[in-house]
Image (tube, rainbow, N blue to C red):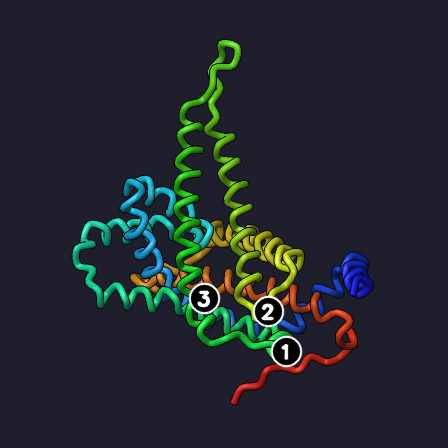
Amino acid sequence: MHFIIDRRTLYVAKHPGRFTLDALKAFRANQGLLLAGAVAYYALLSIVPLMILIVIALSRIVPQHVLLSALGHLLQWLVPGQSKALVHELANFLAHRAVVGWVLFVTMLFFSSLAFTVLENAMSLIFVHRVVIRRRHFLLSALLPYCYILFLGVGALIVTVVSSGLEAVGAAGIDLFGTYVSLQGASRVLLYLLGLAGEIFVLTSIYMVMPVGRPSLKHALFGGIVAAVLWEITRHVLVWYFATLSQVSVVYGSLTMAIVILFSLEWLATLLLFGAQVIAQYERFGLEPQDAPKQPIKTG
């Protein structure tokens, strides 16, 4: 087993281009773009009720303005360029939270879990070599999305506390040998690095939990780093594109925000699933010939 693992690492190190090409071919054979579209669509349905549930829960612990500011930073990672609009809608909802009854609460809880359910099914297609060997109990699959919602709520609380602390440190500054030195720039850099580390942690946890079976931490971290680096590049390109070249507001009018969010989520879902494909390709190395043709998923 150790020999196989050494061969995998050696092969990727010697032939990174070929390994990437093989992963892209397998991703295309698995209808990765189609799966990403499904994940993005249900994520669009899930993001608003999920944020509402997190805001309702955490607003009892954290002041509202601090919470919304931290969520704004969080949403910049998830939906670049549209975080202010979403935070504005969340603030409007908080002003009328008295209308939330049990029926609406259960409905939001259901819709907030849809994206995780679809993501688990998409992962099953990519990690089909695991599914054949071992299937997950249906009760565990049913509870998994809600456990992840709780996990994201705790993560949002940690982000809120850390970001507010860093902003306070940056605003204070220090007196260095009689000279006032502002720490605002340093706090922003530290906040970005912590956000990137949190991004890798979340993606790694998805690769650890969502697919059937339990991959090694090294494999999940490898996929998490790949997806995080690609998304960091992509989201900065998206911000630049929508701010300078895009004419989406002219074409879609009042639907602009929904279209932009859906487009961003589809890119994120594509990179998320491609990171999973990289892990699956790494795991399958040595189990089948390198030049074996990929069997595409057929519909109809």
Question: Along the line of sight, which residue is nearer the eye, 36 or 101?
Answer: 101
Q: Which mark is residue 208?
A: none
- Total number of numbered labels? 3
Q: Please name the residue that numbered disc 2 is placed on.
A: 213
- Dot 1 corresponds to which residue? 133
Q: Position of residue 32 (x, y in %)?
A: 57, 72
Please report whichever mark, 1 or 2, sits nearer to the chain's N-terminal start: 1
- In the displayed structure image, the side of residue 276 where residue 157 appears, left or right: left
Circle 3 sits in a helix, a strand or a loop, which is it? Answer: helix
Q: Is residue 30 left or right of residue 50?
A: right
- Helix, strand or loop at label 2? It is loop
Residue at 26% x, 63% y: name it.
105
Is the residue 191 above or below the residue 83 in the image?
Answer: above
> Circle 1 — which element?
helix
Most foreground residue, 259 or 163 = 163
**Disc 2 packing (10 Å; few <14; some 14–19; many ≥20):** some
Which residue does the image show at 44% across and 33% down from the upper left? 166
User: Are the two marked residues, 1 and 2, in contact with CB atoms closer than 8 angstroms?
Assistant: yes
Residue 5 pos. (x, y %): 77, 62
Front-lying residue, 218 or 163:
218
Mark 1: amino acid: Ile
Residue in the picture at 54% in, 63% down: 209
**Mark earlier in primary sequence (1, 3):** 1
Q: CA distance from mark 1 to mark 2?
A: 9 Å
Please report whichever mark, 3 or 2, sits nearer to the chain's N-terminal start: 3
The answer to whether the residue labelled 1 contacts the one labelled 3, judged by CB atoms less than 8 Å apart, is no
In the depicted structure, whether residue 28 falls above or below residue 75: below
Q: Horizontal placement of 163 versus 6: left or right?
A: left
Q: Estimate the x, y position of residue 171 in percent, counting from the top left.
A: 40, 26
